[in-house]
Image: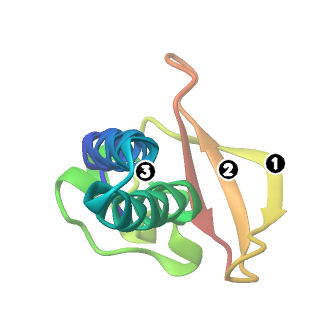
Amino acid sequence: MLSTTTRVVLAVVGTLMVIGGLSAVAVGGAFGTGGLWLVIFGAIIVVAVVLERQRYRSDESDRAFEPIGPGGGEPSDQLEPRFRRTDERFVDPTSGHTMRVYVDPRTGERRYLAER
């Protein structure tokens, strides 16, 4: 899973490649063929960033490179005590795990844990 900064940088680079490639194709000549490759590779980068899976993890867990819990959520033994269990549950369509929502009542921050 990519960090937000990495995703933004890749999206900008891919978009610039597409724009530069389209400009080269518009100029034509020897630049046209190279421009076509820039468009293709830039489009691949942008599509990959858009389709990259986002899972149910906090930014803190990602930055600390903590292990990924079942269903892509937080590791069950590492949830801070400030989070309170809610009645909200859902099935993660990617993993098929039933995820339980926990909320910090003070800030509204949410965490997701797979239920056993």
Place of residue 5 in the rendered image (x, y in percent of width and height, measured from the top left):
26, 40
Q: Is residue 95 above or below residue 32?
A: below
Q: Mark 1 — residue?
A: 88
- Label 3 residue SS: helix
Q: Earlier in the sequence, mark 3 or mark 1?
A: 3
Q: Nearer the viewer, mark 3 or mark 1?
A: 3
Judged left or right of residue 91, residue 101 is left
C-alpha gap between disc 3 and disc 1 = 52 Å
Judged left or right of residue 63, residue 73 is right
Place of residue 44 in the rendered image (x, y in percent of width and height, measured from the top left):
46, 66
| Residue type indicated by callout 3 | Val
Q: Residue furthest left?
A: 64
Q: Residue furthest front?
A: 29
Q: Mark 2 — residue?
A: 101
| Residue type indicated by callout 2 | Val
Q: Earlier in the sequence, mark 2 or mark 1?
A: 1
How packed is label 2: few (under 14 Cα within 10 Å), some, or many (20 or more)? Answer: many
How packed is label 1: few (under 14 Cα within 10 Å), some, or many (20 or more)? Answer: few
- Label 2 residue SS: strand
Judged left or right of residue 111, residue 82 is left
Q: Quadrant of the N terminus?
A: bottom left
Numbered label attached to residue 25:
3
- Pointer 2 with pointer 1, Cβ within 8 A: yes
- Residue found at x 37% / y 58%: 32
